[in-house]
Amino acid sequence: MRSSRLHPSLIFIAAPFVVIITIFLSILYGAKDMELSTITAALFHFDPDSIDQQIIWHSRLPRVVGALLIGAFLAVSGALMQGMTRNILASPSIMGVSDGSVVMITVCMIILPNTTPLGMVLYSLLGSAVGAGIVFALAWLLPGGMAPVRMAILGTIVGTFLSGAAEAAAAYFQISQNVSFWYHARLHQIDPVMIRTILPFGLAGLILALLLARSITVLSMGDEVAAGLGQRTLWVKVLTVLTVVILTGISVALAGKIAFVGLLVPHITRYLVGIDYKWVLPCSAILGGVFLAWCDILSRFINSPFETPIGVVTAIFGVPFFLYLIKTRGGKQLA
Protein backbone atom coordinates (compact mmCIF):
# COMPACT_ATOMS: atom_id res chain seq x y z
CA MET A 1 0.00 0.00 0.00
CA ARG A 2 1.09 3.51 -0.70
CA SER A 3 1.89 5.48 2.44
CA SER A 4 -0.51 8.28 3.33
CA ARG A 5 0.41 11.77 2.17
CA LEU A 6 -1.79 13.41 4.77
CA HIS A 7 -2.80 11.97 8.12
CA PRO A 8 -6.59 11.49 8.18
CA SER A 9 -6.79 12.97 11.68
CA LEU A 10 -5.99 16.38 10.18
CA ILE A 11 -9.15 16.15 8.07
CA PHE A 12 -11.20 15.08 11.09
CA ILE A 13 -9.82 17.94 13.21
CA ALA A 14 -10.42 20.55 10.51
CA ALA A 15 -13.86 19.22 9.54
CA PRO A 16 -15.98 20.88 12.30
CA PHE A 17 -14.44 24.30 11.66
CA VAL A 18 -14.77 24.02 7.88
CA VAL A 19 -18.36 22.78 8.15
CA ILE A 20 -19.35 25.63 10.50
CA ILE A 21 -17.77 28.22 8.17
CA THR A 22 -19.50 26.60 5.18
CA ILE A 23 -22.90 26.68 6.89
CA PHE A 24 -22.41 30.30 7.92
CA LEU A 25 -21.43 31.45 4.42
CA SER A 26 -24.26 29.48 2.83
CA ILE A 27 -26.77 31.21 5.11
CA LEU A 28 -25.13 34.61 4.63
CA TYR A 29 -25.08 34.81 0.83
CA GLY A 30 -27.87 34.36 -1.69
CA ALA A 31 -30.35 36.32 -3.78
CA LYS A 32 -30.59 38.49 -0.68
CA ASP A 33 -27.55 38.77 1.58
CA MET A 34 -28.32 38.39 5.26
CA GLU A 35 -26.99 40.58 8.06
CA LEU A 36 -24.95 38.87 10.77
CA SER A 37 -27.41 40.14 13.40
CA THR A 38 -30.30 38.55 11.47
CA ILE A 39 -28.54 35.19 11.37
CA THR A 40 -27.77 35.34 15.09
CA ALA A 41 -31.35 36.28 15.93
CA ALA A 42 -32.74 33.51 13.73
CA LEU A 43 -30.55 30.85 15.33
CA PHE A 44 -30.99 31.89 18.96
CA HIS A 45 -34.13 34.06 19.14
CA PHE A 46 -36.34 32.96 16.27
CA ASP A 47 -39.12 35.37 15.34
CA PRO A 48 -41.75 33.67 13.14
CA ASP A 49 -42.98 37.07 11.96
CA SER A 50 -39.59 37.93 10.42
CA ILE A 51 -39.44 37.05 6.72
CA ASP A 52 -35.62 36.97 6.74
CA GLN A 53 -35.57 34.58 9.68
CA GLN A 54 -38.16 32.40 7.97
CA ILE A 55 -35.92 32.26 4.90
CA ILE A 56 -32.95 31.22 7.04
CA TRP A 57 -34.79 28.42 8.86
CA HIS A 58 -36.95 27.09 6.05
CA SER A 59 -34.73 27.63 3.02
CA ARG A 60 -31.07 28.35 3.58
CA LEU A 61 -30.38 26.10 6.56
CA PRO A 62 -32.10 23.05 4.99
CA ARG A 63 -30.28 23.87 1.76
CA VAL A 64 -26.78 23.73 3.23
CA VAL A 65 -27.60 20.73 5.44
CA GLY A 66 -28.97 18.94 2.38
CA ALA A 67 -25.86 19.80 0.34
CA LEU A 68 -23.57 18.47 3.09
CA LEU A 69 -25.55 15.23 3.37
CA ILE A 70 -25.91 14.64 -0.37
CA GLY A 71 -22.23 15.37 -1.02
CA ALA A 72 -21.24 12.91 1.72
CA PHE A 73 -23.59 10.19 0.48
CA LEU A 74 -22.55 10.49 -3.17
CA ALA A 75 -18.83 10.62 -2.36
CA VAL A 76 -19.03 7.48 -0.21
CA SER A 77 -21.09 5.76 -2.93
CA GLY A 78 -18.46 6.62 -5.54
CA ALA A 79 -15.62 5.42 -3.32
CA LEU A 80 -17.40 2.11 -2.72
CA MET A 81 -18.09 1.60 -6.43
CA GLN A 82 -14.51 2.41 -7.42
CA GLY A 83 -13.09 0.12 -4.75
CA MET A 84 -15.44 -2.77 -5.53
CA THR A 85 -15.05 -2.68 -9.32
CA ARG A 86 -11.46 -1.34 -9.39
CA ASN A 87 -12.84 1.04 -12.00
CA ILE A 88 -11.44 4.57 -11.83
CA LEU A 89 -14.45 5.91 -13.75
CA ALA A 90 -17.13 4.40 -11.53
CA SER A 91 -19.65 6.73 -9.88
CA PRO A 92 -23.42 6.70 -9.23
CA SER A 93 -24.14 9.28 -11.94
CA ILE A 94 -22.11 7.46 -14.60
CA MET A 95 -23.21 3.90 -13.76
CA GLY A 96 -26.95 4.51 -14.17
CA VAL A 97 -27.74 4.37 -10.45
CA SER A 98 -28.96 7.98 -10.24
CA ASP A 99 -30.93 7.69 -13.48
CA GLY A 100 -32.70 4.59 -12.20
CA SER A 101 -33.87 6.60 -9.19
CA VAL A 102 -35.19 9.38 -11.42
CA VAL A 103 -37.16 6.85 -13.50
CA MET A 104 -38.86 5.33 -10.46
CA ILE A 105 -39.62 8.75 -8.97
CA THR A 106 -41.32 9.61 -12.26
CA VAL A 107 -43.32 6.38 -12.09
CA CYS A 108 -44.23 7.21 -8.51
CA MET A 109 -45.47 10.68 -9.53
CA ILE A 110 -47.59 9.12 -12.29
CA ILE A 111 -49.32 6.40 -10.27
CA LEU A 112 -49.11 7.91 -6.76
CA PRO A 113 -48.97 11.70 -7.21
CA ASN A 114 -49.74 12.32 -3.52
CA THR A 115 -47.26 9.82 -2.11
CA THR A 116 -45.59 10.48 1.24
CA PRO A 117 -41.91 11.47 1.55
CA LEU A 118 -41.18 7.93 2.77
CA GLY A 119 -42.91 6.48 -0.27
CA MET A 120 -40.83 8.72 -2.52
CA VAL A 121 -37.63 7.51 -0.83
CA LEU A 122 -38.61 3.85 -1.23
CA TYR A 123 -39.37 4.33 -4.94
CA SER A 124 -36.03 6.07 -5.37
CA LEU A 125 -34.21 3.20 -3.64
CA LEU A 126 -35.94 0.71 -5.92
CA GLY A 127 -34.90 2.76 -8.95
CA SER A 128 -31.28 2.86 -7.82
CA ALA A 129 -31.29 -0.93 -7.54
CA VAL A 130 -32.80 -1.32 -11.02
CA GLY A 131 -30.31 1.09 -12.63
CA ALA A 132 -27.31 -0.57 -10.99
CA GLY A 133 -28.63 -4.04 -11.82
CA ILE A 134 -29.05 -3.26 -15.52
CA VAL A 135 -25.55 -1.78 -15.90
CA PHE A 136 -23.73 -4.53 -14.00
CA ALA A 137 -25.71 -7.26 -15.75
CA LEU A 138 -24.81 -5.86 -19.19
CA ALA A 139 -21.17 -5.41 -18.17
CA TRP A 140 -21.04 -9.02 -17.01
CA LEU A 141 -22.71 -10.39 -20.16
CA LEU A 142 -20.72 -8.42 -22.75
CA PRO A 143 -17.10 -9.38 -23.57
CA GLY A 144 -14.74 -6.98 -21.80
CA GLY A 145 -17.69 -5.19 -20.25
CA MET A 146 -15.96 -4.80 -16.88
CA ALA A 147 -13.10 -2.75 -18.37
CA PRO A 148 -13.19 0.81 -16.97
CA VAL A 149 -13.93 2.73 -20.17
CA ARG A 150 -16.39 0.14 -21.52
CA MET A 151 -18.26 0.03 -18.24
CA ALA A 152 -18.43 3.82 -18.18
CA ILE A 153 -19.80 3.80 -21.73
CA LEU A 154 -22.38 1.16 -20.78
CA GLY A 155 -23.40 3.19 -17.76
CA THR A 156 -23.72 6.34 -19.83
CA ILE A 157 -25.83 4.58 -22.47
CA VAL A 158 -28.13 2.99 -19.88
CA GLY A 159 -28.36 6.23 -17.92
CA THR A 160 -29.23 8.22 -21.03
CA PHE A 161 -31.89 5.69 -21.99
CA LEU A 162 -33.42 5.69 -18.51
CA SER A 163 -33.36 9.47 -18.31
CA GLY A 164 -34.95 9.77 -21.75
CA ALA A 165 -37.62 7.23 -20.86
CA ALA A 166 -38.42 9.14 -17.68
CA GLU A 167 -38.73 12.46 -19.51
CA ALA A 168 -40.89 10.87 -22.24
CA ALA A 169 -43.22 9.38 -19.63
CA ALA A 170 -43.39 12.68 -17.77
CA ALA A 171 -44.30 14.52 -20.98
CA TYR A 172 -46.92 11.92 -21.97
CA PHE A 173 -48.65 12.04 -18.60
CA GLN A 174 -48.20 15.83 -18.39
CA ILE A 175 -46.26 15.86 -15.13
CA SER A 176 -43.03 17.38 -16.47
CA GLN A 177 -43.46 20.40 -14.24
CA ASN A 178 -43.90 18.21 -11.17
CA VAL A 179 -40.80 16.07 -11.73
CA SER A 180 -38.47 18.72 -13.15
CA PHE A 181 -37.06 19.15 -9.62
CA TRP A 182 -35.48 15.66 -9.83
CA TYR A 183 -34.20 16.09 -13.41
CA HIS A 184 -32.46 19.37 -12.64
CA ALA A 185 -31.24 19.25 -9.05
CA ARG A 186 -32.40 22.28 -7.09
CA LEU A 187 -30.91 22.47 -3.66
CA HIS A 188 -32.86 25.63 -2.83
CA GLN A 189 -36.11 23.63 -2.99
CA ILE A 190 -35.08 20.91 -0.55
CA ASP A 191 -37.94 19.92 1.74
CA PRO A 192 -36.94 19.87 5.45
CA VAL A 193 -39.41 17.00 5.98
CA MET A 194 -37.56 14.95 3.37
CA ILE A 195 -34.27 15.57 5.19
CA ARG A 196 -35.73 14.10 8.37
CA THR A 197 -37.14 11.17 6.37
CA ILE A 198 -33.84 10.18 4.74
CA LEU A 199 -31.67 10.55 7.86
CA PRO A 200 -32.25 7.00 9.21
CA PHE A 201 -31.51 5.54 5.77
CA GLY A 202 -28.40 7.70 5.43
CA LEU A 203 -27.12 6.71 8.86
CA ALA A 204 -27.69 3.02 8.09
CA GLY A 205 -25.90 3.38 4.74
CA LEU A 206 -22.88 5.12 6.25
CA ILE A 207 -22.59 2.58 9.07
CA LEU A 208 -22.78 -0.29 6.58
CA ALA A 209 -20.14 1.42 4.43
CA LEU A 210 -17.76 1.75 7.40
CA LEU A 211 -18.33 -1.90 8.32
CA LEU A 212 -17.36 -2.85 4.75
CA ALA A 213 -14.25 -0.63 4.71
CA ARG A 214 -11.69 -3.34 5.44
CA SER A 215 -13.30 -5.74 2.93
CA ILE A 216 -13.31 -3.05 0.22
CA THR A 217 -9.61 -2.38 0.85
CA VAL A 218 -8.89 -6.07 0.24
CA LEU A 219 -11.28 -6.28 -2.71
CA SER A 220 -9.66 -3.26 -4.36
CA MET A 221 -6.51 -5.39 -4.73
CA GLY A 222 -8.39 -7.79 -7.00
CA ASP A 223 -10.83 -10.68 -6.68
CA GLU A 224 -8.06 -13.29 -6.74
CA VAL A 225 -6.17 -11.64 -3.89
CA ALA A 226 -9.36 -11.17 -1.88
CA ALA A 227 -10.40 -14.82 -2.38
CA GLY A 228 -6.88 -15.95 -1.46
CA LEU A 229 -7.20 -14.08 1.82
CA GLY A 230 -10.42 -15.92 2.58
CA GLN A 231 -12.85 -13.14 1.74
CA ARG A 232 -16.34 -14.03 0.55
CA THR A 233 -16.19 -11.64 -2.38
CA LEU A 234 -19.76 -12.25 -3.58
CA TRP A 235 -21.28 -11.23 -0.23
CA VAL A 236 -19.01 -8.20 -0.01
CA LYS A 237 -20.11 -7.08 -3.47
CA VAL A 238 -23.80 -7.64 -2.70
CA LEU A 239 -23.58 -5.60 0.50
CA THR A 240 -21.56 -2.90 -1.27
CA VAL A 241 -24.15 -2.56 -4.03
CA LEU A 242 -26.88 -2.42 -1.38
CA THR A 243 -25.03 0.40 0.37
CA VAL A 244 -24.56 2.32 -2.88
CA VAL A 245 -28.25 1.87 -3.69
CA ILE A 246 -29.27 3.26 -0.29
CA LEU A 247 -26.96 6.26 -0.32
CA THR A 248 -27.60 7.18 -3.95
CA GLY A 249 -31.35 6.58 -3.77
CA ILE A 250 -31.88 8.89 -0.81
CA SER A 251 -29.66 11.54 -2.40
CA VAL A 252 -31.75 11.61 -5.56
CA ALA A 253 -34.99 11.59 -3.55
CA LEU A 254 -33.76 14.57 -1.57
CA ALA A 255 -32.59 16.87 -4.38
CA GLY A 256 -32.47 15.11 -7.75
CA LYS A 257 -29.56 13.84 -9.81
CA ILE A 258 -26.20 15.51 -9.17
CA ALA A 259 -23.23 14.33 -11.23
CA PHE A 260 -19.48 14.06 -10.70
CA VAL A 261 -19.34 14.28 -6.88
CA GLY A 262 -19.02 10.50 -6.63
CA LEU A 263 -16.34 10.47 -9.33
CA LEU A 264 -14.15 13.37 -8.29
CA VAL A 265 -14.07 13.30 -4.49
CA PRO A 266 -12.91 9.66 -3.96
CA HIS A 267 -9.88 10.24 -6.21
CA ILE A 268 -8.94 13.38 -4.29
CA THR A 269 -9.41 11.53 -1.00
CA ARG A 270 -7.20 8.60 -2.00
CA TYR A 271 -4.54 11.06 -3.14
CA LEU A 272 -4.64 12.75 0.27
CA VAL A 273 -4.95 9.81 2.70
CA GLY A 274 -3.92 6.68 0.80
CA ILE A 275 -5.88 3.61 -0.23
CA ASP A 276 -7.00 2.19 3.12
CA TYR A 277 -10.79 2.44 2.96
CA LYS A 278 -11.20 2.75 6.71
CA TRP A 279 -9.88 6.29 6.09
CA VAL A 280 -11.02 6.78 2.49
CA LEU A 281 -14.73 6.39 3.29
CA PRO A 282 -15.08 8.80 6.25
CA CYS A 283 -12.75 11.33 4.64
CA SER A 284 -14.71 11.07 1.37
CA ALA A 285 -17.89 11.82 3.32
CA ILE A 286 -16.35 14.96 4.82
CA LEU A 287 -14.75 16.21 1.61
CA GLY A 288 -17.81 15.32 -0.48
CA GLY A 289 -20.18 17.24 1.77
CA VAL A 290 -17.95 20.31 1.88
CA PHE A 291 -17.30 20.14 -1.87
CA LEU A 292 -20.99 20.12 -2.81
CA ALA A 293 -21.85 22.82 -0.27
CA TRP A 294 -19.14 25.09 -1.70
CA CYS A 295 -20.32 24.34 -5.24
CA ASP A 296 -23.76 25.47 -4.09
CA ILE A 297 -22.32 28.70 -2.67
CA LEU A 298 -20.40 29.29 -5.90
CA SER A 299 -23.58 28.76 -7.93
CA ARG A 300 -24.98 31.97 -6.42
CA PHE A 301 -22.12 34.13 -7.71
CA ILE A 302 -21.42 32.83 -11.24
CA ASN A 303 -24.42 34.60 -12.75
CA SER A 304 -25.59 36.80 -9.89
CA PRO A 305 -28.36 37.68 -9.05
CA PHE A 306 -29.54 34.49 -10.81
CA GLU A 307 -28.48 31.06 -9.57
CA THR A 308 -26.52 28.70 -11.79
CA PRO A 309 -27.83 25.10 -11.61
CA ILE A 310 -25.73 23.04 -9.22
CA GLY A 311 -25.16 20.41 -11.92
CA VAL A 312 -23.40 23.00 -14.07
CA VAL A 313 -21.05 23.91 -11.22
CA THR A 314 -20.12 20.30 -10.42
CA ALA A 315 -19.60 19.71 -14.15
CA ILE A 316 -17.12 22.60 -14.30
CA PHE A 317 -14.88 20.58 -12.02
CA GLY A 318 -16.00 17.08 -12.97
CA VAL A 319 -15.87 17.08 -16.77
CA PRO A 320 -12.17 18.10 -17.06
CA PHE A 321 -11.29 15.58 -14.37
CA PHE A 322 -13.26 12.85 -16.16
CA LEU A 323 -11.46 13.58 -19.43
CA TYR A 324 -8.14 13.62 -17.58
CA LEU A 325 -8.82 10.14 -16.16
CA ILE A 326 -9.74 8.78 -19.59
CA LYS A 327 -6.64 10.31 -21.20
CA THR A 328 -4.14 9.25 -18.55
CA ARG A 329 -5.64 6.09 -17.04
CA GLY A 330 -8.61 5.17 -19.17
CA GLY A 331 -7.45 1.65 -19.90
CA LYS A 332 -6.27 0.87 -16.40
CA GLN A 333 -7.97 -0.36 -13.30
CA LEU A 334 -7.82 1.28 -9.92
CA ALA A 335 -4.41 0.75 -8.39
Image (tube, rainbow, N blue to C red):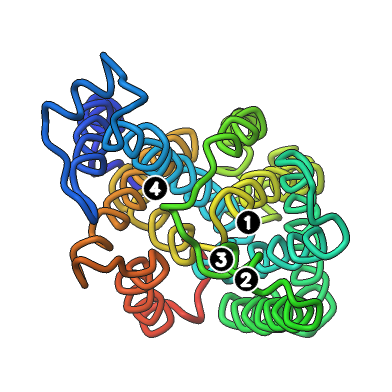
Residue picked out by circle 1: 222
Tell us which disc is closer to us: 1 or 4: 4
> Looking at the rendering, which quadrant does residue 212 occupy?
top right
Q: Do the residues labelled 2 and 4 touch (CB within 8 Å)?
A: no
- The image shows residue 125, relative to residue 145, as above or below, that is above
Tell us which disc is closer to us: 2 or 1: 2
* Relative horizontal placement of residue 100, taking residue 195 as reference (left or right): right
Tell us which disc is closer to us: 3 or 2: 2
> Looking at the rendering, which quadrant does residue 208 occupy?
top right
Residue picked out by circle 2: 177
Numbered mark located on residue 90 in the image = 3
Residue at 39% x, 55% y: name it.
265
- The image shows residue 3, relative to residue 268, as above or below, that is above
Q: Are marks 3 and 1 in contact (CB under 8 Å)?
A: no
Q: Is mark 2 on a helix, strand or loop?
A: helix
Q: What residue type is labelled 1?
A: Gly
Q: What element carries label 1?
A: loop
Q: Which amino acid does label 3 sit on?
A: Ala
* Residue 200 picture location, percent across and down: 65, 28
Q: Residue furthest left?
A: 36
Residue at 74% x, 60% y: name it.
105
